Image (cartoon, grey):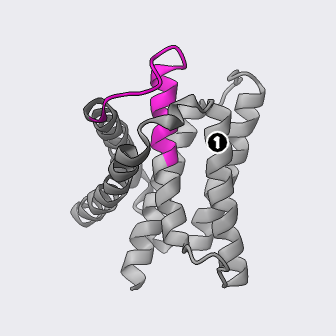
Amino acid sequence: MSKTAEQYKKVIANCRSIFEKKAKDYGTAWRILRISALTDQIFIKAQRIRTLQEKGISKVGDDAEGEFIAIVNYCVMGLIQLELGSETQLELPIEKTLALYDSKTNQAFELMMAKNHDYGEAWRDMRVSSITDLIMMKILRTKQIEDNKGKTLISEGVDANYLDMLNYAVFALIKSDEEK
């Protein structure tokens, strides 16, 4: 488990670095997005990964790893939006934005550690394409929950799905790194 924790933190540090640079370039313009728009952004990224996996060719040059990083960061944005809501100011100071990022990724890490304990790191024996499909399934579930105005009868909410998608994307990045 310590290997997983170390790999996980390395992936998150890379994702955070990209998030921070983009925050310095663009501020928190993403705060204007509704949760449904963030879910759709994650869908676009996952669909692109799936297309790259099936076709094996990229015509725009970006690779699947960059898209998995984007999924991690969009999930964090979604979790922040769920916490802050649309009532809070759009532009957040960089320090507050990064503190929120760290809070959400720490929450995802704790969830991952608990699930890894219970599932015995089953993800290590999965294919990256299967991880992509699980992310796609979680996106479709999230969209359905959003279409139902957040109401569920028995299922977890949007936040739980964002945390799972974030963790699946990290697993895919760990596996990709191991394959190099």
- Seen as rendered, the residue at the extreme front is 25
Residue 145 belongs to magenta span: no
Name the residue rendered at 63%, 30% in the picture: 34
- Residue 148: percent from the left, percent from the top? 77, 25
Left or right: 51, with 175 as reference point: right
Q: How many marks?
A: 1
Location of residue 61 with respect to 97 vertically, above or below: below
Location of residue 98 with respect to 82 vertically, above or below: below
Residue 79 belongs to magenta span: yes
The residue pinned by badge 1 equals 39
* Residue 100 in view, yes or no: yes
Task: Answer with the quarter of the image where residue 143 lies.
Answer: top right
Task: Answer with the quarter of the image where residue 131 lies.
Answer: bottom right
- Residue 68: percent from the left, percent from the top? 51, 62
Name the residue rendered at 38%, 50% in the picture: 19
Left or right: 119, with 21 as reference point: right
Q: Amino acid at mark 1?
A: Thr
Secondary structure beneath label 1: helix
Pick the residue in front: 72 or 172. Answer: 72
- Residue 78: percent from the left, percent from the top? 52, 36
Pick the residue in front: 69 or 167. Answer: 69
Q: Quadrant of the C terminus?
A: bottom left
Q: Quadrant of the N terminus?
A: bottom left
Left or right: 62, with 108 as reference point: right
Pick the residue in front: 97 or 167. Answer: 97
Name the residue rendered at 24%, 66% in the picture: 3
Location of residue 81 with respect to 166 vertically, above or below: above
Task: Answer with the quarter of the image where residue 53 lies.
Answer: bottom right
Residue range (magenta): 74-94
Name the residue rendered at 34%, 45% in the picture: 24
